[in-house]
Each structure stands twice: as structure tokens, then as C-alpha cells.
Image (cartoon, helix red, strand yellow):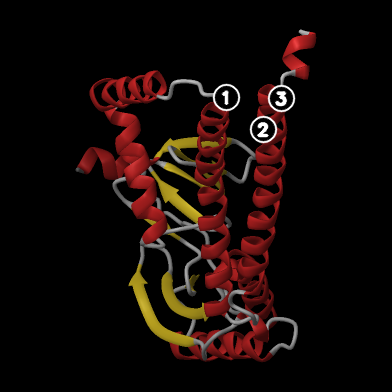
């Protein structure tokens, strides 16, 4: 052991190894810091386009960082093996064997990785988006090389292999439309109900507490359906994508209070029952 540390060749190899390790660590730190700052500077502003750019950049960086770790580790390992004159051929052979095994025995994993790459490159969804994929609905909390992780409203985590995602519904991309359907009783005036309904939508849009969430003027579409016990009227608002659920709940609350104040009835399902007496039954 003493000869090992006193041998000039071994000493040189130890110094080179230490320099390579320190250099790799410093290089990784500088790389992460530089890319992290670039991602933070991307898409300055609070508009929807800037928010989408930041979200996409952070998603790409989070997934790309895992690939960068593997690349840095392989480069470090090969460099150290070269310093210590260790044969690289067996390592390359093992890597080739692993590649063949992956090609034949892990086709689904390769499919998941390729699908994940296209999801990121096409910006179908990213971390922070609320999506519905493969029967699971929730907020995207992580995108890995092979799986996408969702967290639903109950706090459950769903791990969806990227290769199984055939249709992805993104609820928080660019903008959202909050569709409001309200039923009124048949004896109410439809024109009056539509007027009150539209006025309340406009009041909501002009409210300073909510105006930043509204992207366009409200639209009253009119009568949507003549149901069994109610007439359904419909309108919608174009809003910021992450505000759709808050806006929907607040609008329903306001419309209910406004209809109560204006004595417009929102009916519940009703059924008419005809009762026949014994004589009528015998005659029939």
C-alpha cells in the first residue's frame, strides 16, 4: 500500500482523478446554475403566453436534467477508467449487450421514453397543467423519462406510462371557457331571466377582484334546452386557464343570490301524479 502512494505514476493518477472529479462537480454546478437562470429569465411577464413559456421551459429542464446526470456520470466514469489504464472494451461490450436487451426485452420502456420526448417537444402538457390522460385526471406534478405523475383533487398520485397516453386533454393551456347552465321554471319569463343572467355575468367581469381572471366579454347564448321541469339558459366566460374552477363556483353563487333577489325560480325536478278513484277504475 505504501508503494502505491509513493509511486510517481500512481500519484499522478490520483491527482488526475481528483482533478477530474472536482472539475466534473464544478462543471455540473455551473451547468445547472446557468441553465436554471436562463429558464427563470425566459418568458418575463404575467400574461398567458409568458406563463406558458416558463412552464414549458421548467418541464423540459426538469426532464433534461435527469438525462444530463446520466451523461455526466458516463463521461466521468470513462475518463477515470482511461486515467487508470482500465480497458474500456468490456464496458462498451456490456453497454452494447444492455442496448440489445433493451431493444428486445424492454420495448415498452423505449416506447414510453420516445412518447415522453414527443409530449415535451410538442408541448402537449407540462408540469403544473391539469390534464386527463388514460382515465386519470389531476395536476401534473412530475414528468419523468418513462412516466407522467398526476396528483388528483383527493391527493392521490397517478403514475401513467407515457407510451399509454393516446389522448391527452389539457384543461389549463392558453385559456379556458366557463360554461354556465342555469334552469328556470316554465312560468318565468325567459327574456327577463336572460336579461338578469347576462347582467350578472357582466357585473362579475367588471368586479376588480375578478376582472384579471376574465379575458373577454361574457356571452349569453340563450335558451339551451326545454327540459322536463325547467328551461335551461346558457352563457360562458373566457377566463385564465387556472381560474376556471374558482370562476365557475363564484358565478354559480352570484347567480343563485341574484335570482333569489329578483324572485326568479330555479326549480327542482317535479312529477305530476294523477289519482283515479275506484269508480273511474271500474268504468275503465
Q: Which residue is mark 1?
A: 84
> Which comes sooner in the sequence, label 3 or label 1?
3
Q: Which mark is residue 17?
A: 2
Q: Residue at (57%, 51%) from the top-left corner? A: 62
Q: Position of residue 41 (x, y in %)?
A: 65, 74
Label 3: which residue?
A: 8
User: In the structure shown, which secondary structural element does the residue marked by tag 3 occupy?
Assistant: helix
Image coords of residue 9 (percent x, y): 66, 25
The residue lying at 57 percent from left, 78 percent from top is 50
Tell me the distance, in whole angstroms, between the alpha carbons under discs 2 and 3: 14 Å
> Horizontal and vertical percent for residue 71?
50, 41
Q: Are marks 1 and 2 in contact (CB under 8 Å)?
A: yes
Lower position in the chain sequence, tag 1 or tag 2? 2
Q: Of discs 2 and 3, which sits in the foreground?
A: 3
Asked if residue 274 can be seen in this view, the reply is no
Identity of the residue drawn at 41% across and 73% down:
231
Q: Residue furthest top?
A: 1
Dot 1 surroundings within 10 Å: few (below 14), some, or many (20 or more)? some
Task: Answer with the quarter of the image where residue 14 lies.
Answer: top right
Q: 258 or 101: nearer the eye?
A: 101
Quick check: can you spot residue 243? yes
Kind of element beneath mark 2: helix
- Quadrant of the rendered image containing residue 156: top right
Compared to residue 213, the image places residue 162 above or below, namely above
Helix, strand or loop for disc 1:
loop
What separation in Å lies between label 1 and label 2 (alpha carbons)?
9 Å
Mark 3 → mark 1, Cα distance in angstroms? 13 Å
Label 2 neighbour load within 10 Å: few <14, some 14-19, many 20+: some
Residue 243: % across, % down: 61, 69
Q: Would you say 225 lies left or right of 197 here?
A: left
Badge 3 crowding class, 10 Å Cα cut-off, few under 14, some 14 to 19, many 20 or more, is few
Amino acid at each position: 500500500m505504501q508503494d502505491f502512494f509513493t509511486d510517481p505514476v500512481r500519484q499522478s493518477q490520483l491527482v488526475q482523478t481528483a482533478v477530474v472529479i472536482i472539475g466534473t462537480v464544478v462543471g455540473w454546478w455551473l451547468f445547472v446554475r446557468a441553465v436554471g437562470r436562463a429558464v427563470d429569465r425566459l418568458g418575463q411577464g404575467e400574461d398567458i403566453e409568458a406563463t406558458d413559456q416558463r412552464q414549458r421551459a421548467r418541464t423540459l429542464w426538469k426532464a433534461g436534467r435527469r438525462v444530463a446526470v446520466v451523461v455526466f456520470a458516463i463521461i466521468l466514469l470513462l475518463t477515470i477508467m482511461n486515467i487508470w489504464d482500465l480497458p474500456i472494451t468490456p464496458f462498451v461490450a456490456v453497454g452494447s449487450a444492455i442496448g440489445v436487451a433493451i431493444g428486445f426485452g424492454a420495448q415498452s420502456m423505449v416506447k414510453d421514453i420516445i412518447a415522453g420526448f414527443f409530449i415535451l417537444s410538442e408541448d402537449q402538457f407540462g408540469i403544473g397543467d391539469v390534464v386527463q390522460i388514460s382515465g386519470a385526471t389531476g395536476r401534473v406534478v412530475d414528468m419523468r423519462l418513462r412516466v407522467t405523475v398526476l396528483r388528483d383533487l383527493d391527493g392521490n398520485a397517478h403514475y401513467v406510462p407515457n407510451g399509454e397516453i393516446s389522448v391527452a386533454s389539457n384543461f389549463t393551456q392558453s385559456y379556458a371557457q366557463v360554461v354556465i347552465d342555469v334552469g328556470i321554471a316554465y312560468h318565468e319569463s325567459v327574456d327577463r331571466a336572460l336579461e338578469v343572467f347576462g347582467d350578472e355575468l357582466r357585473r362579475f367581469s367588471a368586479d376588480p377582484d375578478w376582472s384579471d381572471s376574465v379575458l373577454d366579454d361574457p356571452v349569453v347564448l340563450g335558451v339551451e334546452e326545454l327540459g322536463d321541469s325547467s328551461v335551461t339558459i346558457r352563457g360562458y366566460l373566457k377566463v385564465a386557464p387556472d381560474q376556471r374552477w374558482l370562476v365557475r363556483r363564484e358565478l354559480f353563487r352570484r347567480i343563485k343570490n341574484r335570482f333569489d333577489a329578483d324572485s326568479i325560480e330555479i326549480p327542482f325536478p317535479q312529477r305530476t301524479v294523477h289519482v283515479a278513484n275506484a269508480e273511474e277504475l271500474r268504468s275503465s
